[in-house]
Image (spheres, rainbow, N blue to C red):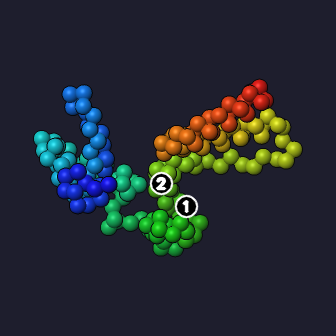
Amino acid sequence: MLCDICNERESVISYTKINENKVEEVHLCEICAEKKFKMDFATYQDIMPKIEDVLRGILKLGPYYHEDEDIVCEYCNRTFTEFKNTGILGCPHCYKTFEYEFDKYLRALNLKDGYKGKIPKNADEYLVLNRKISELKSKLDIAVSMEEYEKAAQFRDKINELKEEKNV
């Protein structure tokens, strides 16, 4: 979708504007968004650098992450940018070095960072059922957050079906 202001570049920011009970969707490219927000917040010049840092942090998955200050593992010299591009870590120490960034990265992807373990083959049926319901609920949450409501309805129906089937 093209930018509403310049009609030249692809929009990267979209927001909904409500004025006098009128709802308007606004789509802006990076350059026009920066100009517009600086104009709109001209009276707040003392807090603009703070807002820019927060926005930069959100877009780069960390509050103090700047392109010119990439985080580097001291053991293998792998950078966080290299990890994001390849998905491959250099050594076991990368987990500790990039711990904060991983947390932000997983939250941005809406993934849980905990491991639940395997279920033994001879486990109680109730435990297996609860795990299935838990997995379906997390898929439901992801579908809702991605606004895939048809998939979400299917997950919801499957959860209700499992609950009725086993009287949970």
Residue 156 figure quarter: top right
Residue 122 place in picture, x, y as percent: 87, 44
Tell me what residue is drawn at x 53 percent, y 59 percent: 96
Q: Is residue 74 visible?
A: no
Residue 39 place in picture, x, y as percent: 14, 47
Mark 1 Cα within 10 Å, few/some/many (few <14, many 20+)? Answer: some
Residue 59 place in picture, x, y as percent: 36, 54
Which residue is labeled 2 in the image?
A: 105
Q: Is residue 86 left or right of residue 70?
A: right
Residue mark closest to the camera, 1 vs 2: 2
Dot 2: element? helix
Relative to the observer, which residue lies in front, 134 or 156? 156
Q: Is residue 86 visible?
A: yes
Ranked by sequence position, the earlier of labels 1 and 2 is 1
Mark 2 Cα within 10 Å, few/some/many (few <14, many 20+)? Answer: some
Q: Is residue 104 above or below residue 19?
A: below
Relative to the observer, which residue lies in front, 120 or 164? 164
Residue 61 figure quarter: bottom left
Q: Amino acid at mark 2?
A: Tyr
Which residue is labeled 1 in the image?
A: 95
Tell me what residue is drawn at x 59 percent, y 66 percent: 92
Residue 130 figure quarter: top right
Q: Are marks 1 and 2 in contact (CB under 8 Å)?
A: no
Q: Amino acid at mark 1?
A: Tyr
Dot 1: element? helix
Quadrant assignment for the N terminus: bottom left
Quadrant assignment for the C terminus: top right
